[in-house]
Amino acid sequence: MCVLCTNVAESKEHLFFECFLSKEIIKFLLNSVEVQSKGFLFSEVTNLKNGVLAGASQCKVAGKAAINLAIYSIWKERNARILRGEEKSIEAIKMEVDSTLKMMLAKINTMELTHKNIQWAIAMGISPEFKRKESDATQTLATMQPIHSQRRSA
């Protein structure tokens, strides 16, 4: 029996993609990084990861990180319930994964200094370091010059 919902026999498909708790966590994390999914079944998440999220742009990396974090968090919650008899509410899990996701995204420090990446970082509530296209010098969002003044000086 699934220890997360106690309604259905546990299987990989149910535990990670069909259980209401799992769907809530995946949906929450994907929404956090502004990635839309048509559904949350294994095949749909796999298609999302290998299709729309294929590539190395920061948004795509964040989407893949969100999916991986969801699966890890679901497994961790399952094991806590089975092995230690501990149970978190969906809201507590969401708070934990939100904090973890922000920490993960803040560690992305190879972003190129582009308007799109700056807007994405601001929308995500993070301030990673950016690498300038023309050099290896890095700046934080707080210390870099506005894009329009960089263009004039170039």
Image (cartoon, rainbow, N blue to C red):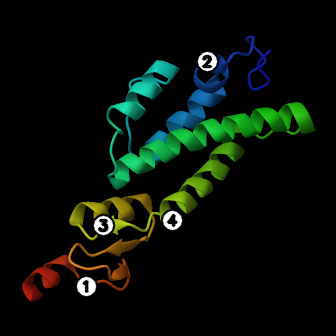
Q: Which residue type does callout 4 highlight?
A: Lys
Q: Tell which circle, 4 or 2, labels the residue nearer the N-terminal end.
A: 2
Mark 3 → mark 2, Cα distance in angstroms: 37 Å
Label 3 Cα neighbours within 10 Å, binned few <14 / some 14-19 / many ≥20: some
Q: Which residue is mark 4?
A: 107
Decide if residue 53 is on the left or right side of residue 87: left
Q: Tell which circle, 1 or 2, labels the residue nearer the N-terminal end.
A: 2
Residue plotted at (57% across, 62% down): 103
Q: Which residue type does callout 1 highlight?
A: Gln
Q: Which residue is mark 2?
A: 13
Tag 3 secondary structure: helix
Tag 4 secondary structure: loop
Extreme residue toward the top, this view? 9
Extreme residue toward the bottom, this view? 153
Q: Which residue is mark 3?
A: 118
Mark 1 → mark 2, Cα distance in angstroms: 48 Å
Quadrant in which residue 9 is drawn: top right
Q: Are marks 3 and 1 in contact (CB under 8 Å)?
A: no
Q: Which residue is mark 1?
A: 145
Residue plotted at (24% across, 60% down): 116
Residue plotted at (22% across, 81% down): 146
Q: Which residue type does callout 2 highlight?
A: Glu
Quadrant in which residue 123 is drawn: bottom left
Give coordinates of residue 118: x percent, y percent: 30, 66
Mark 3 → mark 1, Cα distance in angstroms: 12 Å
